[in-house]
Image (cartoon, grey):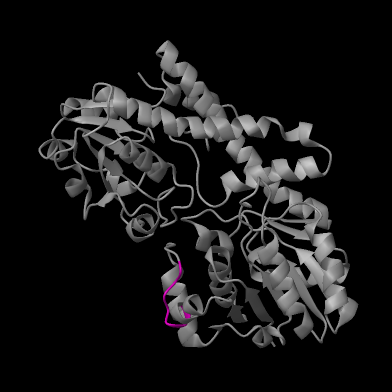
Amino acid sequence: MPLRISVIGTGYLGAVHAVGMAELGYSVVGVDVDDQKVAALSRGEAPIYEPGLDELLSKHLASGKVRFTTDIEAAADADVHFICVGTPQRHDGLAADMSYVDAAVDALAPHLARACLVVGKSTVPVGTAERLAERLVKLAPAGSDAELAWNPEFLREGFAVEDTLHPDRLVFGVTSEAAEQRLREVYAATIADGTPVVVADLATAELVKSAANAFLATKISFINAIAEIAEITGADVTKLADAIGHDARIGRKFLNAGLGFGGGCLPKDIRSFMASAGELGAAHALTFLGEVDAINLRRRERVAELAREVVGGSIAERRVAVLGAAFKPNSDDVRDSPALAVAGQLHLEGAHVAVYDPRAMANAERIYPTLEYAESAVDACRGADVVLHLTEWQEFRVIDPVELRGVVERPVVVDGRNCLDADAWRAAGWTYRGLGRP
């Protein structure tokens, strides 16, 4: 009989994980406290835009393999329970807010009257799993037969469905061979496809995700720091990145200088990691992440500075076209979006800002309702004194600079992602400015 799976929390992580588990052949119930989200998912409406998610959701609602409810008791009979709730940054500091994870375990545990495995997937400070394991045994009627494990997620927004079904690695944080074997059973098809498995203790599994995000953030901020030097010296950071990227010890991925990272993971995760290190008495070990964060935030100001510079010093009363609102392409996620941060800053300085994004318009408008939102890239650029390319959607990469020149007031573009064809834009009569490029 196929395993029965419950997924507690049906936001970005949970919704994708629930349909992914259904695609792997399991009977899945997704549980969330938000009745509107549950109702939408039950109608086949995903809470986020993620390529492939809508199709899988519709497929498995129709097959009956996945259903959604606000009733936590519906999860009672599951063999494996995945905790997929958020851990946002606290309002009063850098640390992660663990209230949602704690609440999920507290709500689930009283319904666990039989042997089962509770698996955390959320990004948490080290020590959380050990604490929750003790609480689970205390609250669950099954006692020690309700075991806790940690299986961190490594999803890339825009590729989350692919990463769920075909991950580049699986990490199992366990305290018993039985827990390891149960997780191997859950992911049997994935493992059979060749996905490597790392079996570790709980603390290591927790640290893996924090360390991975800290490393990626550091690599991005490193190349952006080099871009600052390149701008002063007249060097080309994109050529530099190509050159050092050929070194197998370094690699080319995540060496794209530009506006920097955003979203709901990297920024808050590196801050939470720093806070956790401080609580452990090892704040000195991660002080460099403070500069990683600072470099990242400086890139936003640099783009705003370039926008002012190319229009003569003051952005007030100028028309600014912003291409992009999501923090990255193939997503509608605007959490800590660098693109919207720049748009909002220029708006505060008196600019008339028109924004266009293929997917994130509704989410952007909820956060920045005073900005103007256009129906297309061309409409956003009408009468613009400067065009800011801030999210690297394919639609923007292939836009015709000749056509666009016909609708702007001044053909000036600031490429905040360094992915437009500078030669083609210049040949079309544009003044092109990139980050860290001559």
Question: Which quarter shows the C terminus?
Answer: top left
Residue 250 appears anywhere in the view: no
* Residue 298 drawn above or below residue 107: above
* Residue 427 position in % (x across, y down): 18, 26
Q: Residue at x 70, y 75 (%)?
A: 81
User: Would you say 4 lies left or right of 18 here?
Assistant: right
Please say whether residue 382 is one of the residues in the magenta stretch: no
Work out which residue is located at the far left of the displayed protein and give it: 406
User: Mainly helix, strand or loop, the magenta region?
Assistant: loop
* Residue 160 position in % (x across, y down): 52, 60
* Residue 27 drawn above or below residue 234: below
* Residue 415 drawn above or below residue 67: above
User: Would you say 235 lies left or right of 179 here?
Assistant: left
- Residue 182, by quadrant, is bottom right
* Residue 206 position in % (x across, y down): 75, 53
* Residue 377 drawn above or below residue 117: above
Question: Which quarter shows the N terminus?
Answer: bottom right
- Residue 76, by quadrant, is bottom right
Q: Nearer the viewer, residue 107 or 6?
A: 107
Work out which residue is located at the far top of the displayed protein and give it: 233
* Residue 433 position in % (x across, y down): 31, 25
Q: Which residues are magenta?
A: 41-47
Q: Residue at x 34, y 39 (%)?
A: 348
Q: Residue at x 71, y 40 (%)?
A: 274
Q: How many marks?
A: 0
Residue 154 appears anywhere in the view: yes
User: Would you say 289 lies left or right of 203 here?
Assistant: left
